[in-house]
Image (cartoon, rainbow, N blue to C red):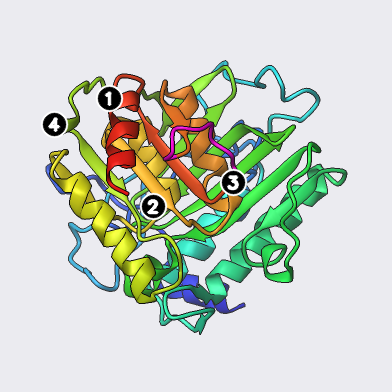
Amino acid sequence: NKIKNAYKLHPPATSKIVGGCLPCFNSIPPCNEASAVLVLVSAKLRVPVGSKSVQPSIIPNPLHPHPLHFSSRLRRPLFPPGVKNGPKCGGIPVRCSGCRKESWRVNRNGFYQTKHVEHKSQVDLVTETDKACEDLIFNHLKQHFPSHKFIGEETTAACGVTELTDEPTWIVDPLDGTTNFVHGFPFVCVSIGLTLGKVPTVGVVYNPIIDELFTGIEGKGAFLNGKPIKVSSQSELVKSLLATEVGWTKRDKLTVDTCTNKINSLLFKVRSLRMSGSCALNLCGIACGRLDLFYELGYGGPWDVAGGALIVKEAGGVLFDPSGADFDITSQRIAASNPLLKDAFIEALQQSK
């Protein structure tokens, strides 16, 4: 009811497109009931299944009420036409009937409201939106896949049950970038991954604030808002853009010094550094070529990487442990790049200890 009442304050309204206006962080996402194995995240609350009505819509941004501060989005499928099941998706139906749209609504409305924040630690936060979005996604997925396993940051992990098995498992981070969300910084996302045999097979990462939807199915490629994406072709470390995060929620002197010393060493070898506050979106940045290099030591758990890891792989990227070993989704250590930079990146990481 809280979410519904908040939504009534800023209901969608039709509007003509104003030529030349720049999109802001209040763009409305597409209305679709499209086709994905995984983010069952779409048209339940807004457009009835099968509806052919398409109208550009806006939601006023209470922080920027000027009428030009919007961008219009039409319906589009979660995956491009013809992209159905990946080779390992077996009997899982390709559906997208409720999750993406509903979780968008929960996250986006919460973004512009006063947050009620709980502190797991000094730097590890959780909001009502995290919990509401995870409940929504899990309830929806369980209706369609009752025999599957589920791992989520705010429920399963909070109870200390995070064991990943070979069974089909949905791994969900309902709000990656909670600190960004609390501060109104628009790098937040819903991340959902499906693993089979502990291997990511389907991934969806959606930033509802700027309306960017990254998707991937094993063997079928990676996409941003339905358009194919590929990793960068950069081959020189010195010209590369690096992303990282502080990682570990501890802020003791040893942890901070270790992190900053590594960053200081790497800064001499790359063009520049970014810290956006979202592991999943950093992985998607690698996948679409905005970033060339990414590493993080001590991320929260498999929910941070399950969606983005598959998208990187399908975009032609490589995932590995910062030590150079194979990537392990349960290790809380990850590095990603294009294939051309992998060896030089591993060498730089090893020299920065």
Q: Amino acid at mark 3?
A: Ile
The residue sitting at 45% across, 47% down in the picture is 280
Query: What residue is disc 3 on?
Result: 192
Q: Amino acid at mark 1?
A: Ser
| Disc on the earlier residue, 1 or 3 | 3
Which residue lies under the disc numbered 2? 28
**Nearer the observer, disc 1 or disc 3?**
1
Determine which quarter of the picture holds residue 130. bottom right
Discs 4, 3 touching: Cβ within 8 Å: no
Determine contact: label 1, label 3, CB under 8 Å: no
Element class at badge 2: loop
| Picture coordinates of residue 259, whole percent (x, y) | 32, 60
Quadrant location of the N terminus in the rendered image: bottom right
Which residues, given as a range, are shown in magenta? 322-330
Give the labeled residue for mark 1. 232
Tag nearer the camera, 3 or 2: 3
Q: Secondary structure at mark 4?
A: helix
User: 312 or 205: nearer the eye?
Assistant: 312
Q: CA distance from mark 3 to mark 2?
A: 20 Å
Q: What amino acid is at disc 2?
A: Ile
Q: Could you say where residue 217 lies in the image, as x and y percent from the top left?
A: 58, 26
Query: Mark 4: which amino acid?
Result: Lys
Residue bearing the label numbered 4? 239
Judged from the image, the secondary structure of the residue bearing numbered disc 3 is strand
